[in-house]
Image: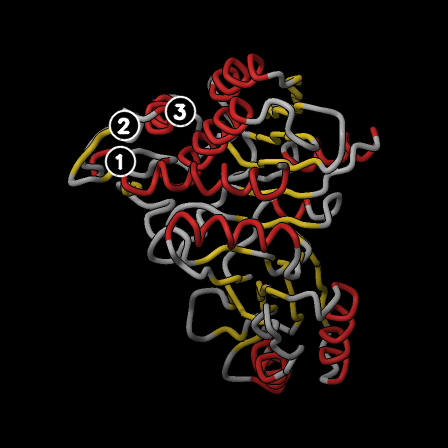
Amino acid sequence: MSKTLALTEQLIALSSVTPEDNGCQKRLIALLEPLGFQCESIQSGNVTNLWARRGVAQPLLVFAGHTDVVPTGPLDQWQSDPFIPTHRDGKLYGRGAADMKTSIAAMVVAVEEFVTAHPQHAGSIGFLITSDEEGPATDGTIVVCNLLMERGEQLDYCIVGEPTAAVILGDTIKNGRRGSMSGKLVVKGIQGHIAYPQLARNPIHVAAPALAELVAEKWDDANEYYLPTSWQISNIHAGAGVSNVIPGELVIDFNFRFSTASTVEDLQQRVVAILAKHELEYSLKWTVSGLPFLTPRGELSAAICAAIKSETGLDTELSTTGGTSDGRFIAQICPQVIEVGPPNGSIHKIDEHIEVRYIDPLKNIYRRTLENLLT
């Protein structure tokens, strides 16, 4: 059994549902310290974070990831225990197999091989690992990033081990992610008997033209890296549950997934302008869960793409699709952040898995990237 597969299985066997780490990071520290890493465990609330660094010189290349996993869902729907790594038909099954304990194992073994072969390598290598990526993400990577910024530690490159491949290993990497901003809009009306509409004001009716305009609005244009910004209603509710009462208010939850072509302030102002145009009486609460980030083509993407080409023969695609990741925090202190990991088809699902044939090649991609940047 390869070292990477063995470590992956060890990590899967440690049940670490957010915000629990359950010893995963201690296992990583036990492997990193003999390689010359200075390891620091940073506790914040119920969250365990690890900052490890080897070397003091620039450039600093950081591997980032998370040891926490999402809940299993109904255990009786799994073909095998989600925390007992199990092999079937060339696949390794277990919660975290794809998201993202394989990536963490591959990163650690890649660094071990690289440091053994190049003990006097250029620059420095770091690890930023959290147990709070799948949860609120308030005590995890952002805490470590703030600490590093206070210390003046400069990150030059960061590889995040999120599962990015669409079909086969290496076909897609993420050089950015869209931002996410939600709004809770409460449109006020006047409740009344449905037979006497002149004595009431239906908030659904008065809001409908404004909603139609918001749906039709072109927020920005697509570009080489991003789809156009999207505004979507996720929940809508009004009424008392009976057919003879005009509701007194309409509650709408909506979300922007936005690119670097738009700003939080601009999007908020444009929404408010449309609501004002339609003379709605309303309240609106905003929540920004992540800002967009983008790493244009450069040294890091070139090094990763070359590593993927050498290992798999594929010309990888740079993409910014998908949900948010901790890359949004790291990008605030690091100019080049790219996510690269295994196929994402089974993440967060019952019977999460990874094809075993991808495990060592992923490790080799990380090692080749180190060779491309630090030798």
- Element under disc 3: helix
Q: Residues within 10 Å of mark 1 (few under 14, many from 20)?
A: many
Name the one closer to the observer, 355 or 213.
Answer: 355
Q: Residues within 10 Å of mark 2 (few under 14, many from 20)?
A: many
- Element under disc 2: loop
Circles 2, 3 touching at the beta carbon (< 8 Å): no
Name the one closer to the observer, 117 or 187.
Answer: 117
Q: Who's the residue at 76% across and 30% down the image?
A: 57
Instruction: Kindly report the distance in space between the C-alpha atoms of the residues bearing marks 2 and 3.
Output: 9 Å
Estimate the x, y position of residue 142 in percent, counting from the top left: 69, 37
> In the rendered image, which quarter is residue 227 located in?
bottom right
In the rendered structure, the answer to whether residue 288 lies left or right of residue 72 reads right
Circles 1, 3 touching at the beta carbon (< 8 Å): no
**Mark 3 lies on residue:** 11
**Mark 2 lies on residue:** 85
Estimate the x, y position of residue 110 in percent, counting from the top left: 48, 31
Name the one closer to the observer, 334 or 193.
Answer: 334
Q: Earlier in the sequence, mark 2 or mark 3?
A: 3
Q: Earlier in the sequence, mark 1 or mark 3?
A: 3
Q: Who's the residue at 68% across and 50% down the image?
A: 336
Circles 1, 2 touching at the beta carbon (< 8 Å): yes
User: Which quarter of the figure is the C terminus placed in?
Assistant: top right
Name the one closer to the observer, 213 or 258.
Answer: 258
Residue type indicated by callout 2:
Pro
**Mark 1 lies on residue:** 93
- Element under disc 1: strand
> In the rendered image, which quarter is residue 369 located in?
top right
